[in-house]
Amino acid sequence: MKSARRVSAVTFNGLACAGVLAACAVSGAAHAGNLEQVPVDPVVVVAAPTWQGFYVGGTAGYAFGADDRVGHKNPAGVLVTRRAGDLDGEGFNYGVQLGWRGERALSRGSFVYGIELGYNGGDVDDSFVNGGYTGSVDLNHVLGLRAKTGLTNQSGNTMVYGILGYVHGDFDYAVNGTAGGDTINLNTAYDTDGYSIGLGVEHLLSDSWSVKAEWEYYNFGSKTLFDAGGSSTVATPTYSNVQLGLNFRF
């Protein structure tokens, strides 16, 4: 009987130990499963900046480097003097613009293209007194329609671009003097067409705001102007303009 009791006790103790080990194994497996299921923070994808859409803006600039040599012809078209003086207009100016841009992604950065309508006015003028001649020019305003295309850097927040445009200028122009037996007495307002070319760089400050710096060369061709008696001069206004600007994309 004592032997049977010992066998039963040993058997009970063995079963108890096996149960404890099994419980520990199950608990360990549960804890291991919990370690494997630690939550992972979601990956946040930052959207690349974009230039696409409509925008409005304003500029402030300075015109310089003009070159207009003033001559004088009599009513018969004979050149009286080749250089009565020079009208090299310069001065501060301001502008406003409305534009649209599209964008194509590249392997690095993007290609940006668009069109812009702008108005420039201000105080771009010059005058001369030379011998028996006086003259003056005053640029009232310029309307321009420009194509602008460029490339951004890899991050997409800075763009370098080129400018090609049609411009229409409005001028006040005067030449007065006597030489070679003829007097020119010209004081007129005229408008003329021309072109512009230039370069610029623009940087995004936010999703909507950007700042820019531009250089632009204006050429208004040549236009013959006559006074009341038929004496004439040829106006050939050209100049460069550097400007800073601020744009808002909407």
Image: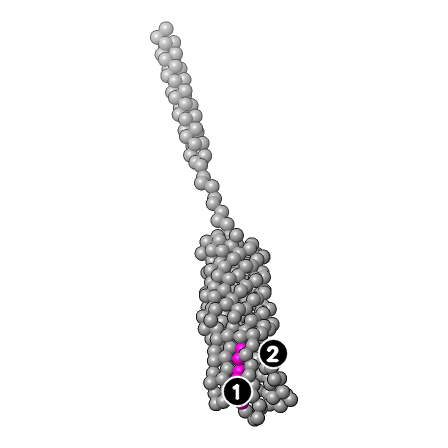
Residue at x 49%, y 71% (from the top left corner): 241
Q: Magenta stretch: give its range.
A: 173-178
Residue at x 41%, y 23% (from the top left corner): 23
Q: Amino acid at mark 2?
A: Lys
Q: Amino acid at mark 1?
A: Gly
**Nearest the eye: 34 or 14:** 34
Instruction: Give residue 205's position: percent from left, percent from top.
Output: 45, 56
SS for callout 1: strand
**Nearest the eye: 159 or 115:** 115
Q: Residue furthest right?
A: 76
Q: Is residue 9 depicted above or below 107 in this figure?
A: above
Q: Residues within 10 Å of mark 1 (few under 14, many from 20)?
A: some
Q: Label 2, label 1: how many angstroms apart (C-alpha)?
A: 19 Å
State the residue position of label 2: 223
Residue at x 42%, y 34% (from the top left corner): 35
Q: Residue furthest bottom?
A: 180
Residue at x 56%, y 71% (from the top left corner): 169
Q: Is residue 135 magenta?
A: no
Q: Is residue 88 visible to the viewer in this orientation of the structure? A: no
Q: Specify the principal SS of the magenta part.
A: strand
SS for callout 2: strand
Instruction: Give residue 75's position: percent from left, percent from top.
Output: 63, 87
State the residue position of label 1: 177
Instruction: Give residue 120's position: percent from left, percent from top.
Output: 51, 66
